[in-house]
Amino acid sequence: MAYDENRDVEIEEIGRYPTAKGAIVVVLSQYDGGAVKVSIHRVREDKDGNEDRSKLGRLAADEAEGLGPLLIEAGAKLHGYNAKVTAALESAQASKSGKGRAK
């Protein structure tokens, strides 16, 4: 299956760590209703003033240290979101299989 950006949803921005040329942003994202995952991007402002995101790549020591608290927060929130996703999937599967229906 090819990647479809319309199925990639940003659930919540956890925070940004400022850098000399922009920032590093940590977000919770979900693809096609699947598990919520942490996404980390480097962001810069383009010549028109729009935000341009790119792959994170390598980190300087201060960037790695600065991301620590953001990643801890993201991890804590991730468990809550994925518990909701799992419960919804289990409920949908039970409905399809006929379990949980009143007789």
Image (tube, rainbow, N blue to C red):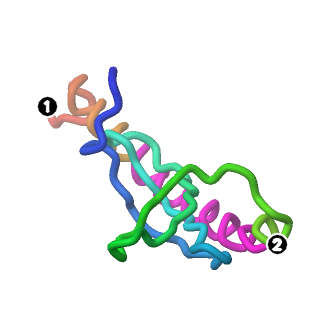
- Tell me if I can see residue 79 in this picture: no
Q: Is residue 9 left or right of residue 65?
A: left
Say above or below: 8 vs 98: below
Find numbered disc 2 in the image and state the secondary structure of the residue it sits on.
Answer: helix
How far across and how far down the image is residue 67, in percent? 71, 68
Residue identifier under label 1: 103
Q: Crowdedness of circle 1 by 10 Å Cα count: few (<14), some, many (20+)? A: few
Q: Is residue 61 left or right of residue 53?
A: right
Residue identifier under label 2: 62
Using the image as rendered, state which of residue 93 and residue 74 is in the foreground.
74
How far across and how far down the image is residue 16, in percent? 58, 75
Residue type, label 2: Asp
How far across and how far down the image is residue 87, in percent? 39, 46
The magenta region covers 66-86
Cα–Cα gap, marks 1 and 2: 61 Å
Q: How many numbered tags mark residues here?
A: 2
Q: Residue at x 58, y 57 (%)?
A: 40
**Image quarter hosting the C terminus:** top left
Residue type, label 1: Lys
How far across and how far down the image is residue 27, in percent? 50, 62
- Tell me if I can see residue 14 in this picture: yes
Q: Is residue 1 left or right of residue 63?
A: left
Asked which quadrant contains residue 90, the reply is top left
Using the image as rendered, state which of residue 17 and residue 50 is in the foreground.
50
Using the image as rendered, state which of residue 5 and residue 57 is in the foreground.
57
Q: Residue at x 76, y 58 (%)?
A: 59
Q: Residue at x 64, y 70 (%)?
A: 73
Q: Residue at x 29, y 36 (%)?
A: 4
Find numbered disc 1 in the image and state the secondary structure of the residue it sits on.
Answer: loop
**Image quarter hosting the N terminus:** top left
Say above or below: 40 vs 88: below
Question: Magenta part mainly helix, strand or loop?
Answer: helix
